[in-house]
Image: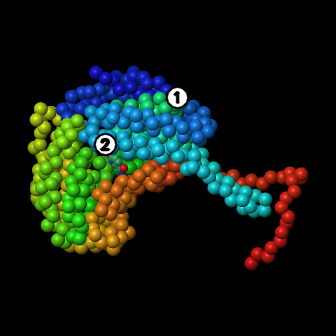
Amino acid sequence: MKTVKQLINGAFSTSSSKQTIKVTNPANNQVIAELPCTTETEMLMAIESAKVAFELWREVPVLERARVMMRYQALLKEHHDELATILSQETGKTFADAKGDVWRGIEVVEQAMNVPAMMMGETVENVAAGIDTNSYIQPLGVCVGITPFNFPAMIPLWMFPLAIACGNTFILKPSEQDPMTPMRLAELFMQAGCPNGVLNVVHGGKEQVNQLLTHEDTRTVSFVGSVAVGQHIYKTATSYMKRAQCFAGAKNHSVIMPDANKSQVISNLVGASVGAAGQRCMAISVAVFVGSAKEWIEELAAEIAKVKPGLWDDEDAGFGPLISPQAKARVLSLIAEGKQQGAECLVDGSDFILAGYEQGNWIGPTVFSDVTERMSIYQQEIFGPVLCCMCVDTLDEALALVNRNPYGNGTSIFTASGAAAREYQHRVEVGQVGVNVPIPVPLPFFSFTGWKNSFYGDLHAYGKQAIRFYTETKTVTSRWFDDEVVHSPNLTINLR
Ligand code: NAD
């Protein structure tokens, strides 16, 4: 059986820990690897190596740092299929979906290749007579990333390439549920020319994370995961005076106006709701039908019912299994609560089992109508292939519903009316809005801008905001004296 290694000070080693976690294939729950959790002493070594490496790495010219990213981008593209295969095997994602996961990460590396331009400061000459002020962007030190299971390539790549391109060093603690993809990302990063200690990867859970949050030598904490953990990490990290950005759970609504293009609505919502088994933080989990658009619910449900779960290498599979038996049990219990609380289950995937893979974490596509705000299927993030349909009479009511929800990650509106779309995008209290685009994830030159309970912090992931998150601004105000230098004539002008 494979034992997952860790990366400390440039060496891929097996932890001496006796504490191990089993990595499983979600399709049948067979153990595919063993993950030893990094010991306390090894954690200290990782932090120390990142601290020492920072003093050298910060002095490496910015273009050289960018060139590491260029080589990394080329390696990621070369190994795209191999990475997607590892990713599929440990998450159950379809191969196409896994390739998308890797690709969205590659795009952030491409952003990191552009770091020289992004680290330019500002200059004002003559802030007073003979005095200039320049601002410089400087790295902070040791940065930390804690990532979730659902995007084991994209989300680590949201973090360490940009942090490192800025001149920082990094410690990644990937999800213990699918650590093999991040380890392969780390191997390729070392191959691209990353010096020892600049990237470290450690493994485990709460214990290891707490050590990173509380150690005096870590400067920033980037977290992506569930709300409860995100709140804990944000509070702990900031109480230890770290800069923190914590991306948390979601409940994303799509509002469907009666003037929308029906076939586009239906085909877009099928993939956006149950694709990736609903295990996307930007999945559409609530469809809000305005007025007569409610007549489309049954047709939408019928299309969603046709999506077949299957193995990662089955080209006809719409999505794969859930990540773990615990995740499956949680989704099944929410589906049962939905039925008990009075929602109508139009499509029920609770009993779905893939023949030959009876031990896997399978759930079929599921659609509820007549969902109300008081039901637990509405209040909780289900994180499974379940769509809740709700009906309102007006756009105003739809806006009020979406704005009452405590999450604010993503939303979309389907309409043919520019005025309705403009009203919605202006008034909705959600950080990422799609107009006739179901999953509006911004590309890396923008930032990933969740709001409310979907994000704790000030500066978001990737784009210009990430450069600010991973750096400090220094202003230098200077004046020079030299008797040999003739100064500009002292002109006098009347200032009014
Ligand atoms: P999770 O919160 O269980 O785990 C995330 C990370 O935190 C893992 O590395 C885990 O080891 C660590 N962790 C877990 N418990 C901890 C604790 N008590 N103390 C310290 N660290 C702890 O999340 P998950 O199940 O891996 O991922 C799914 C969640 O992530 C969903 O809620 C989803 O919405 C969210 N997510 C959000 C975004 C976003 O951008 N907003 C993106 C992807 C996923």
- Disc 1 under 8 Å from ligand 1? The reply is no
Please tell me in which quadrant of the rendered image residue 176 appears. top left
Residue beneath disc 2: 150
Location of residue 202 in the rendering, given as x and y in whole percent from the top left corner = 42, 31
79 over 492 or under it: above or below: above
Label 1 with label 2: CB-CB less than 8 Å: no
For the N terminus, the image quarter is top left
Residue at 80% from the left image edge and 52% from the top image edge: 480
Residue beneath disc 1: 196
> Which label number is shown at residue 6?
none
Label tally:
2
**Left or right of 321 on screen, residue 74:** right
Q: Can residue 117 be seen in the rendering of this structure?
A: yes
> Which amino acid type is shown beneath numbered disc 1?
Asn
How dense is the environment of label 1, judged by Cα within 10 Å: few (below 14), some, or many (20 and up)? Answer: some
- Disc 2 under 8 Å from ligand 1? The reply is yes
